[in-house]
Amino acid sequence: MAETTLTNPQQPPQLIGGLRGIAADWSSDQRAFKNVSWGKAMMWIFLLSDTFIFSCFLLSYMTARMSTTVPWPNPSKVFALHIGGQDIPLILIAIMTFILISSSGTMAMAVNFGYRRDRTKTAVLMLATAAFGATFVGMQAFEWTKLIMEGVRPWENPWGAAQFGSSFFMITGFHGTHVTIGVIFLIAIARKVWRGDFDVERRGFFTSRKGYYEIVEIMGLYWHFVDLVWVFIFAFFYLW
Amino acid sequence: MTNVAVQIEGQQPALHMHAPDAPASTVTHAKGQQHPIKLYLVVWGWLFVLSTCSYLVDFFGIHGYLRAALILLFMVLKAGLIVAVFMHMAWERLALAYAILLPPVLVLVFVAIMVFESDYTHLLRVIFFAAST
């Protein structure tokens, strides 16, 4: 009973909107987030904390780049690929960006089909998202290998400021770890969707709680966040 | 549970949940977001267009303030679309939206502090270490 109350809260008859609504929600009894389940609220709060982590990485990168007297390597040239007899700037990074955006698109549709209780389409779209994510990590591994072969290390590189390597490995490494965890998370949830756990309300292995299709949306929040972080990395590290 | 399922069928997307005169829309959220698939495809398309634009900024070698402005513009538009539509923040109650979106904005204060700090470090390096490097 308590579980039902927490996961599927019955709404109070009317909620006020606007700024008055914010004051009313935050000063109200028991819960500030009125029509959001605890799972979703906690995912949002986790993502907020993760935002601060990535903000600190990008800030330390900014500080290193602004305070060094040695020229910063030109990312446009560093990340160029030699295709068809000419160097195309940043092409690998551009392809990785499109792949990650596509994975966000399939994820958003998976959430939608989840709420329509169409478990086949949901699972297939989630697996497609996971495949895009795995492709992204693969391309990142290729990029790392290429740079390491060219002599980039956290403490030196052939083109300029030494902090380039440490910033690059720290930021993209942490982002790649997030993508990898996301792929594992996606496969785990897709398996549950495929098996029909959320239709028969099968209890979870660890938690012994019933699952709902909302977990697909919560999973989606995490995945979109990974895409969101890439938007900032792409802008600040690769393009700037 | 059938109760929940019935309510999912009956939900229409409520674009203005925070409007005071929309009591029926307040139950939308916990029962799931229902938006047409077309909305996601349109946003997907826009994200592709914006990413291509930001790539072209580099491809055509635009420099200086224009480059920075364009990069930031496309970045903010992409981030906004992802958060608002894909993550459904546009349909959440303001109490949640402000709680999550306001703190990252305050990071800009930290950015300002570090800009001053790194300018100062740079100055010291130029004055005292420039000869040795």
Image (cartoon, rainbow, N blue to C red):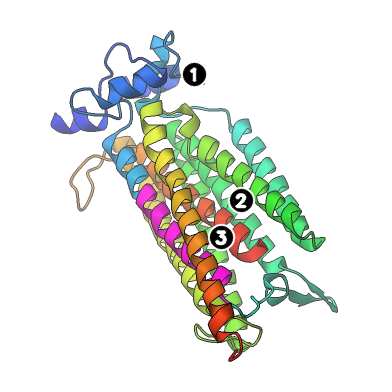
Image quadrant in which you'd find residue B68: bottom right
Element type at mark 3:
helix
Q: Nearer the N terminus, badge 2 or badge 3?
A: 2
Residue B45 x/y as whole percent: 69, 42
The amino acid sitting under disc 1 is His
Residue A99 x/y as whole percent: 62, 57
Q: Which residue occupies 66% across, 77% down?
A: A73
The amino acid sitting under disc 3 is Ile
Q: Give the chain letter at badge 2.
A: A
For the residue pair A162 and A36, the one nearer the viewer reads as: A162
The residue indicated by pointer 1 is B16
For the residue pair B19 and A7, the one nearer the viewer reads as: B19
The amino acid sitting under disc 2 is Ser
The residue indicated by pointer 2 is A102
For the residue pair A119 and B121, the one nearer the viewer reads as: B121
Crowd tier of the residue under label 1, counting other residues whose Cα lies within 10 Å: few below 14, some 14–19, many 20 or above: some
Element type at mark 1:
loop
Crowd tier of the residue under label 3, counting other residues whose Cα lies within 10 Å: few below 14, some 14–19, many 20 or above: many
- The residue most toward the front is B127
User: What label sits on residue A118 in the rendered view?
Assistant: none
Residue B47 x/y as whole percent: 65, 45
The CA span between labels 3 and 1 is 32 Å
With respect to residue B22, does A179 lie above or below? below
The residue indicated by pointer 3 is A233
Q: Which residue occupies 56% across, 60% down?
A: A233
* Magenta-colored stretch includes residue A59: yes
Magenta-colored span: A47-68
Judge if badges 3 and 1 mark residues of a common chain. Answer: no
Residue A68 lies left or right of residue A37; in this view the side is: right
Q: Which residue occupies 50% across, 21% down?
A: B13
The answer to whether residue A61 is seen in the rendering is no
